Image (cartoon, rainbow, N blue to C red):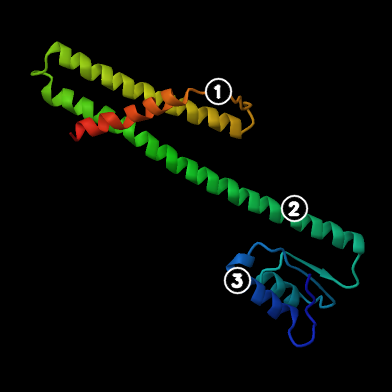
Amino acid sequence: LLDIMMPQMDGFEVCRKIRANPANQEIPIIFLTAKDDTDSVVKGFELGAMDYLTKPFNGAELQVRVKTHLELSRARAELHTLNATKDKFFSIIAHDLRNPFTTLLGFTQLLDANALTYTPEEIQHRAIRIRASAERLYALLENLLTWSRIQRGIMQGAPRDIDLFALVRENMALVTDKSEQKH
């Protein structure tokens, strides 16, 4: 809460100094002052105030406004955290999708380039690897869709025990295809 008319430094200058620090951008600032002219109100908002009340003020109204702005500030911080989490998650998903797609593309290119020279066994071997890569890709997509449903509240999370060794083997299989392609 800032008053405009203060000794040594007016409320506008205090607001400028608060907003000059990027770490303080989300702090809700409310001017509470006797200055009710349009220029002062506009200047307060231009400097970054979230609200502007004039004196004499109603105490109950002030409390409600402060509470509302604090709730909005918390909601913005939570939204920022959720967006950062989402961005990180999508970055991980994009990275994880790259390996199965690389495998699919690599093996289909090999089949395309060598289809006439491969034996039926070699074609079958490549087809098995393509299918395994497609299944891993599909499983990753299913996990993404499940996560999305949980985030939207459509589905509840269901924690369960997992076979960590099987999970490690499955992830090793993701990089094995790529390493074999690169010899």
Q: Which residue does the image show at 78% across and 73% down from the upper left?
A: 2
Q: Secondary structure at mark 3?
A: loop
> Where 30 sits versus 93, above or below?
below
Mark whose residue sits in front, 3 or 1: 1
Query: Cα distance, mark 2 to mark 1?
Result: 38 Å
Which label sits on residue 21? Answer: 3
Quadrant where the image shows the C terminus: top left
Q: Which mark is residue 53?
A: none
Which numbered disc, 2 or 1, marks the residue closer to the eye?
A: 1
Amino acid type, residue under disc 3 in the picture:
Asn
- Near-viewer residue (127 or 50): 127
Task: Out of 119 and 105, give the one closest to the viewer.
Answer: 119
From the image, which quarter does the N terminus lie in?
bottom right
What is the CA distance from the residue labelled 3 to the residue labelled 2?
22 Å
Q: Which dot marks residue 161?
A: 1
Amino acid type, mark 2 = Glu
* Occupied quadrant, residue 51: bottom right
Where is mark 2, residue-wise?
71
Element type at mark 1: loop
On screen, residue 134 versus residue 68, left or right, reads left
